[in-house]
Amino acid sequence: MILQIETATTVCSVALAKDGQVIAYRQINQRNIHAEVITVYIDELLAAEELTYDNLDAIAVSCGPGSYTGLRIGISTAKGLCFALDKPLIAIETLEAMAYGVINDAQIINDEMLLCPMIDARRMEVYTALFNGEGEQVQATAAEIIDENSFSELLKNTKILFFGDGADKCIAVLGNNPNAQFIPNFTNSATHLTQKAAEKFIAKDFEDVAYFEPYYLKDFVAGKKAV
């Protein structure tokens, strides 16, 4: 029984998975509400399934890249539960979880298509990586500024499926290429962590709870408060 937490974007989502299958979840797509609802959602899930915290075998969390504040809230919650309950912590990179969310919808992809999850990193910058249809990462995670030349060589001969809140703002720039396809309004979800969380649990691929930190990718730069 794994509790799964996703807070890397504007979505706050928690899910319960048993033996690699989601049995319940709660989520909301609303900015700046994560800290308010995350523990409430976890309590509601457990109560609805007539479970207690002691029934959990591990906590899995989407670890970034993504929103600094969102990641801190999700990972702090996960680490706190792991400390209190003496349960293992499983970390899954957010872009990888997004890719598996699409892979598990077999109607969307084919074997020759690459998957490009994108997380909004302000202006025309996104956090992104490339995955094949088996979930294998074929291009490293990076912060990229998207323009009309982005992915141009790959798009000459390869279909790429773009999705995530970062992809929504790139349609105007990349959408004219016939090999560029988009999933509009893709929503991050804790349910997307299920397959990798189960695999890592079986392999005992756990994090050191004391020292684990979010995968921010970029250093935090505080903005000036508007007057």
Image: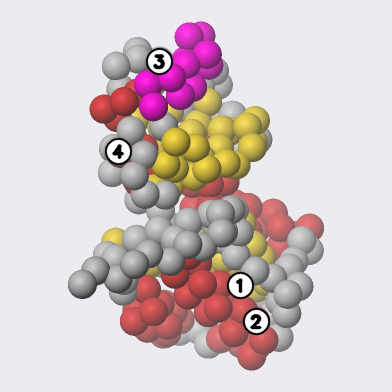
- Quadrant location of the C terminus? bottom left
Q: In the displayed structure, would residue 33 be above or below residue 123?
A: below
Pointer 3 residue: 179
Residue 109 point in image, percent of width and height: 46, 27
Question: Residue placed at 38% from the left, 64% from the top?
Answer: 223
User: Seen in the image, is 219 located left or right of residue 32?
Assistant: right
Q: Secondary structure at mark 1?
A: strand
89 and 170: which is toward the camera = 170
For marks 3 and 1 on the same chain, the one whose residue lies earlier in the sequence: 1
- The magenta segment: 147-157
Q: Is residue 158 visible?
A: no
Looking at the rendered structure, which numbered label has been put on residue 139?
A: none
Question: What numbered label is drawn on residue 169?
Answer: 4
Q: Secondary structure at mark 2?
A: helix
Q: Amino acid at mark 1?
A: Ile
Which tag is nearer the camera, tag 2 or tag 4? 4
Label 3 SS: loop
Question: Dots 2 and 1: beta carbons under 8 Å?
Answer: yes
Residue plotted at (67% across, 86% down): 83
Which residue does the numbered mark 1 point to in the structure image? 59
Up the image or down, 124 lies above or below 224; here it is above
Mark closer to the observer (3, 1): 3
Q: How many residues crowd around disc 2 within 10 Å: few (fewer than 14), some, or many (20 or more)?
A: many
